[in-house]
Image (cartoon, grey):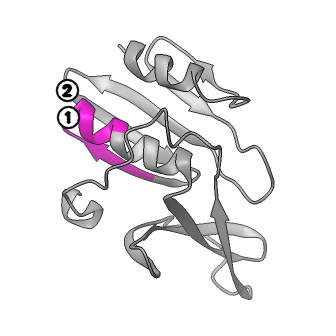
Amino acid sequence: MFEDLLEKLKKCDQVPYETGQHFIRIPPTSSAGFSIVIEWIWDTHFTVFLDGWHQDFDTYQEAVRCFALAVSGHYRLKTRSKGGFRFRWTVEYWDGSDWVEDSTTTDLFYPFWKPTSTNYLRNDLHCEDAMDMSRPAWNLAAAS
């Protein structure tokens, strides 16, 4: 299923990844990064996970593009934590001059009474040449 994406990842120097029958996972390579997973759910249905954030896609091409943008550092995650427990993840993309918020995933159960902190996570795995770097024509928030 992911042969073309695996070929691209092989061209990325020093990018660790794991594969299964229906998924590819790239673990975080630093404390400032996040895990990236693309999973084939059924037929033409795919899900991309960026740490605790996730998005469903109806086409393989859209899912691969989201995965590639996260690998390259064109996406970053704004995370919100309560008492060290991450409960909200917002994908932001670089528009050429600033980071723009796009889509948010929130856990329903978290220690709401604890102090809130914000952190930013970003991967920069140096894969721009191997990955398709064009920004998706759709808005992630509109795709949910």
Residue 122 image point, x, y percent: 63, 60
Picture layout, residue 45 above or below residue 99: above
Magenta-span inclusion, residue 62 = yes
Residue 45, position in %: x, y?
Answer: 24, 31
Q: In which quarter of the image is residue 15?
A: top right
**Numbered label tally:** 2
**Above or below — where is 14 with respect to 22?**
below
What residue lies at 52% left-to-right and 36% top-to-bottom?
37
What residue did someone put label 1 on? 59
Question: Is residue 114 rendered to the left or right of residue 142?
Answer: right
Compared with 4, 71 (above or below) is below
- The residue indicated by pointer 2 is 44
Asked if residue 71 lies left or right of residue 68, the reply is: right
Marks 2/1: CA distance?
Answer: 6 Å
Q: Where residue 33 appears, x then y in whole percent?
A: 70, 54
Q: Give the range drawn in magenta.
A: 54-64
Q: Do the residues labelled 2 and 1 touch (CB within 8 Å)?
A: yes
- Density class for disc 2 (Cα within 10 Å; few <14, some 14-19, many ≥20) is few
Is residue 51 part of the magenta span, yes or no?
no
